[in-house]
Amino acid sequence: MNDNLVKLVIISGRSGSGKSVALRALEDIGYYCIDNLPVSFLLELVQTAKNNYPKLAVSIDIRNLPKNSDSLNIIFNEIKNNDQIDSTIIYVDADDAVLTKRYLETRRLHPLSKNHLSLDEAIVTETAKLSSLAMRADLRIDTSNLSIHDLANEINKLILGKVEKKLVIVFESFGFKNGIAKDADFVFDARFLPNPFWDESLRKYTGLDQCVINFFLKYPEVDRYIKQLDDLLMEHLLQIERSNRSYLTIAIGCTGGKHRSVYIANALYQKFKERNLAVQIRHRTLDKIHN
């Protein structure tokens, strides 16, 4: 382990998406946290942190972005290319309708309301202004259907499981009936494969149960699809690692998120784990059921 390495987590996202919750979760696991830091101070702060705050988290939002997007790119490029900094940029977001509902419920004013914009206009404007930062994110978390507790748990699981200066590959299953996974880098559809849901004896089980696993083992097209996805990901993995990303999120979806997507996501997770790569697994629908 490099004793001079600074672990830096940058939290950003649209107003009302959960940045403060994410920052508090990081504080709970030992990060020194600074809310609403002007981006221009970021490099100076990291230099100071080397001796005093080796685990540092900062929140950056619409209020403290530089006016010139080139300045933002220069700062983030310096951070990503610095071997003394293990950085992760997390972008939290939610559906427009969810953000609107949260503002109406709390009666808070949007940061851009001072520009005489309506709430809808402020949300649209903020989306455009944060677009370059969102594109730089290593990890995106959609909080539309997450409680405060769920978001804190998600942050803890992802950050505590991260390996220094190594790409973490996150496999996740989800159900299309709950909406497409918006926090993924790759989204693959498994709805065309045989579905154990139509077998009443299997319906209550999941893709992690042996009876459902045995069901899929009978169909060569399922194994063929897993191999095709595995080959595709491995073909591009080296290039992705060279881009200095911290996370790569791969989502597999089926109709309900209980059988096909769970089985395939878990199969891919096991393949990558056997290669001694840093991997994590999460099953969005199953997590909701168990909670």
Image (cartoon, helix red, strand yellow):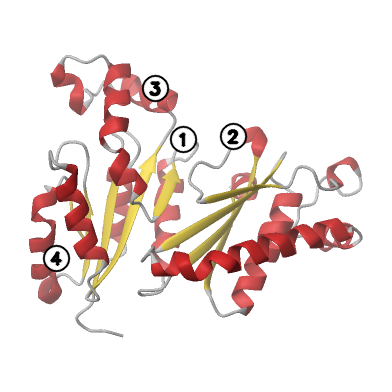
Disc 1 from disc 3: Cα separation: 11 Å
- Identify which residue is drawn at 19% across, 43% down: 69
Is 60 on the left-hand or right-hand side of 99? left
Disc 3 from disc 2: Cα separation: 18 Å
| Label 3 Cα neighbours within 10 Å, binned few <14 / some 14-19 / many ≥20 | few
Residue bearing the label numbered 3: 101
Residue 179 marker: 2
Can I make out residue 160 in this image? Answer: yes
Q: Is residue 208 above or below residue 84?
A: above
Query: Looking at the picture, which amino acid does disc 3 mark?
Result: Lys
- Identify which residue is drawn at 17% across, 47% down: 70
Which structural element holds mark 2? Answer: loop
Q: Are marks 3 and 4 in contact (CB under 8 Å)?
A: no
Disc 2 from disc 1: Cα separation: 10 Å
Q: Are marks 2 and 1 in contact (CB under 8 Å)?
A: yes
Residue bearing the label numbered 1: 144
Can I make out residue 35 in this image? Answer: no
Is 152 on the left-hand or right-hand side of 52? right
Residue bearing the label numbered 4: 46
| Label 1 Cα neighbours within 10 Å, binned few <14 / some 14-19 / many ≥20 | some
Q: Name which of mark 2 and mark 4 comes first in the sequence.
A: 4
From the top left corner, tell me how far across and down residue 263 is, in percent.
73, 57
